[in-house]
Amino acid sequence: MPINYLPNDPLAQAFAPLREINPAPDRPGNRAGFTFSGAANQGLHPIGTSEFLFWQCREAALRSVGAWEALDGRLNRWFGNRRNLRLRQDVGEDLNAFYDRASLSFFHRTTGSKTTFSGASTDVVAHEAGHAFLDAIRPQLFDVSLTETGAFHEAFGDIVAILVALLDQQIRETLLEVTSDLRQANFVEATAEDLSDGVRLAIGPNHPAAKPRRALNVFQWQNPLLLPTSAPPDDLSSEIHSFARVVSGCIYDTLSNIFNSRPARNQCALLEAAQVTGRLLIEAARAAPLETRFFRSIGRAMIHADTDQNGGANHLAIRDAFAAHNITLGSAAMLAPTSILAGAAPALTGKAKKLKVAKEMTPDLAKRMGLSGAARFTFRALRLAGETITEAVHDHATKLDKIHSRLKGVIAMAPTSVLIGSVGQRASILGGLPDLHGTEDEVTQFVATLLENDCIKFDKTQAFVSETTQRLRTHEIKKVGARKVLTRLAFDCFPNCAGRSTS
């Protein structure tokens, strides 16, 4: 029996209207899937009903996983070796959605005659699924207290929503009727239009989320330390949903550049461009070294992934896209040897290809970074530009006492990484060493932004949702051994979405 399905967003129906489709089958038991709740009888239920919402949200989630597997192969487990995530299509009143490593959760809110259901938008469901996909392949990014890492997580969700749309032939054909070169504003690069409209109606037009996030934009990268912690929707701030638009612009422009380089700019070429861009982005998300300038790291990793996957055919498309947003990649410098370390170069040994690191290398590296000789590192081997190199990561603690009295004795963690290769048989630093003082400055600014936006749950008596602003609290303070550590609870879809009016 068919169901009604919105393939994009409720406010994009002029371009992607309601369809009658046969619903996707349940996920195979040996692959990552969902646990559904509030099941409804299958049928052509009207938009706005709970029955429609169940089937719409289910279909959007399953199509998102299908799109991911078309780009990256089988997805067998979510983060934490979970087989299933809960898909909760309506858990209460709010203008938001979130991923918290256990669920994809969505809400509703009525303003006047309009009720906004975040789970009714394929854009929003795919965005939250994007957080889950990224967490499955690179869980280290979830809890990093740096603006660009958090912003990349948000941009990744937006790009996944765009890719889910572009893997649909009807949407590709309609999109090319709207813009033959992808360089005019359109319903695909704008995400979560209906949810943004709900924010505008409920809170006011100056709220940061009162307009859709657009991947087609001209935002220029700036150091987030120089930006305000919140801004109206047309301006850039250091809040991660706002700042995410810089790197989503880079990825969308990469897609556009690849598409426009094709001899025939038709829906088949658009599908190919989407597939190429998606695969480069996914591989970059896996491999990009952890650093404060993570957007640049992603761009460089895309360049190197393109060398491996496509023989470098799309280097200019990537380079020009990032440069258009004031991010100069210099991808060759990323792997240039700069100094020699004590000991032999790390190497993969044995049948299991276990990474072997010379014992004298670690204290030497710590000393060069200004750390104690007992500083700990984790090491991983990664492939960049056809070479196996080693990333050494130190989780650096920043004290938060000076930000607010409620953060006395609390620390926030941010990884600092060094790439290590070989010169002859000796270990060599590639590209340079991180600036730990700069890292601490950016962690402090990130946490100050969380504090100003009421994102931190300070004790167990506080609700997950702020009582004053109805803001989903994305962080809490946890005891880790003898230390109090600021820890992420969830990624939400929009910043501070149900607070007081700003109109």
Image: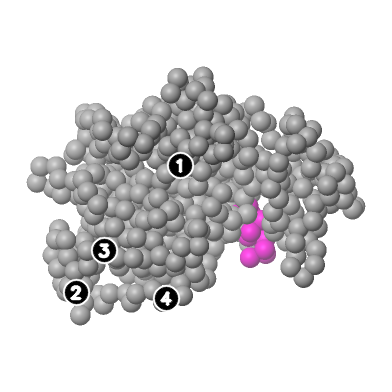
Q: Nearer the viewer, residue 328 or 484?
A: 484
Q: Measure how far apart labels 1 and 4 are at the Cα level.
A: 30 Å
Examine the image and state in which quarter residue 271 appears. bottom left
Which type of secondary structure does the marked residue at label 4 adopt? loop
In this rendering, does residue 219 appear at all? Answer: no
Outermost residue, right side: 424
Residue under pointer 2: 42
Sequence order check: which comes first, mark 1 or mark 4? 4
Q: Nearer the viewer, residue 330 or 258?
A: 330
Question: What main secondary structure does the magenta stretch of the protein show?
Answer: helix
Say if 198 sits above or below 3 in the image.
above
User: What numbered label is drawn on residue 37?
Assistant: 3
The residue segment tinted magenta is: 301-312
Q: Measure how far apart labels 2 and 1 are at the Cα level.
A: 37 Å
Tell us which disc is closer to us: 2 or 4.
4
Which type of secondary structure does the marked residue at label 1 adopt? strand
Residue under pointer 1: 488
Sequence order check: which comes first, mark 2 or mark 4? 4
Q: Measure how far apart labels 1 and 3 are at the Cα level.
A: 26 Å
Q: Nearer the viewer, residue 275 or 202?
A: 202
Q: Position of residue 28 (x, y in %)?
A: 41, 76
Amino acid type at circle 4 is Gly
Say if 219 sits above or below 17 in the image.
above
Q: How many numbered marks have been drawn onto this rendered protein structure?
A: 4
Q: Is residue 306 magenta?
A: yes
Q: Is residue 79 magenta?
A: no
Quarter of the image with the N terminus in it: bottom left
Say if 470 sits above or below 140 in the image.
above
Quarter of the image with the C terminus in it: top left
User: What numbered label is drawn on residue 29?
Assistant: 4
